Image (cartoon, rainbow, N blue to C red):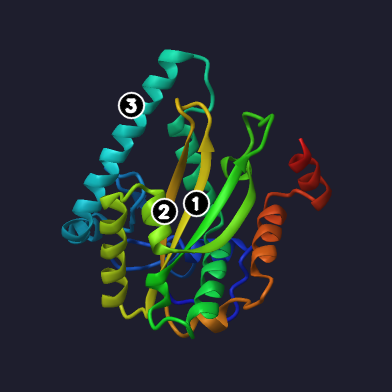
Amino acid sequence: MSIQPALIVDSRAARREFTQCQMCGKDKEHFKIKLSVCTGCRIATYCSSKCQRDNWPAHKQLCLQRRKTNEQTADMDRTVKDHNPLTHPLPSELIAELRSFTQKFNPVIFQAGINIMHMGRHLWQDVWRELVLMIFLSRLPDIQENSRPWARFKVDHVLPVPTDYVMNYTGGDDSFVQLRREREEENLANGYTGTITAMICTGCDSSDPPKMLHNVTFYGFGPHSFVAVELTPEWQKSFTENVEKMCGRPATELEASSST
């Protein structure tokens, strides 16, 4: 990704920079292109059928894994509805909301990831392999049906955690390991220094027992990235404030929702 200083993380232009063809890397902001979503995984995007065909050998395993995950989520939906047909939101709806949150706040997440890479790069040679950015969200109460999916959450915690913790958190999920390895190899082959791994999480109270759901995303970065974003010791505060600002919620509203 070609990011020039400085990245205005709350701008539409920044969000469009992070919406790219999975094969050629063309983004919507600079190339003014329309991207189509893979019908298999419903996540990867492509600018043409040729790019999608050319990327299939690299995308195949990830696509199949995401299809399997979608099937597992559908099974969770059926179990929840068997207990209470009126339950809302369903696990699949929560996952869709997490993906919407990720897409909306890609530049903000990237900035937070660069900050933790900056803090840790003097401690580890490949800090991006040692740390994962974890973002814990709470779904706000009394959600309006016509509200934006990405605006239905508030940030509880955003912090760097060791990769080993994430492995314990996911129960040693092989798909996470495989997905991360593939994206790291892909980004290194494309000339990036490393890969930021971010995991966006929220609780699903409708499942029995309640469990955490998550969406994982990856960002390639290089030396230019450290001058493209704001580097600050208060990056966690900046992250939360940017989310609230982009959701159109003043600080007083955030405090009120936190106390309910």
Give coordinates of residue 236: x percent, y percent. 65, 64
| Cα separation between marks 3 and 1 | 22 Å
Give coordinates of residue 58: x percent, y percent. 20, 60
Q: Which residue matches tag 3? A: 75
Quick one: quadrant of the N terminus?
A: bottom left
Q: Which residue matches tag 1? A: 200
Q: In percent of the image, x 49 and y 66: which residue is there?
A: 17
Give coordinates of residue 73: x percent, y percent. 36, 33
Camera-nearest residue between 150 and 19: 150
| Cα separation between marks 1 and 2 | 6 Å
Other-residue count near label 1 (Cα within 10 Å), few / some / many at <14 / 14–19 / ≥20 = many
Secondary structure category for the residue under label 2? strand
Camera-nearest residue between 19 and 155: 155
Relative placement, left or right, of 38 versus 154 is left
User: Could one spot residue 195 in this view of the protein?
Assistant: no
The image shows residue 101, relative to residue 203, as above or below, that is below
Give coordinates of residue 165: x percent, y percent. 42, 58
Other-residue count near label 3 (Cα within 10 Å), few / some / many at <14 / 14–19 / ≥20 = some
Looking at marks 3 and 1 on the same chain, the residue that comes earlier in the sequence is marked by 3
The label shown at residue 216 is: 2
Could you tell me the amino acid type at mark 1?
Ile
| Cα separation between marks 3 and 2 | 20 Å
The label shown at residue 174 is: none
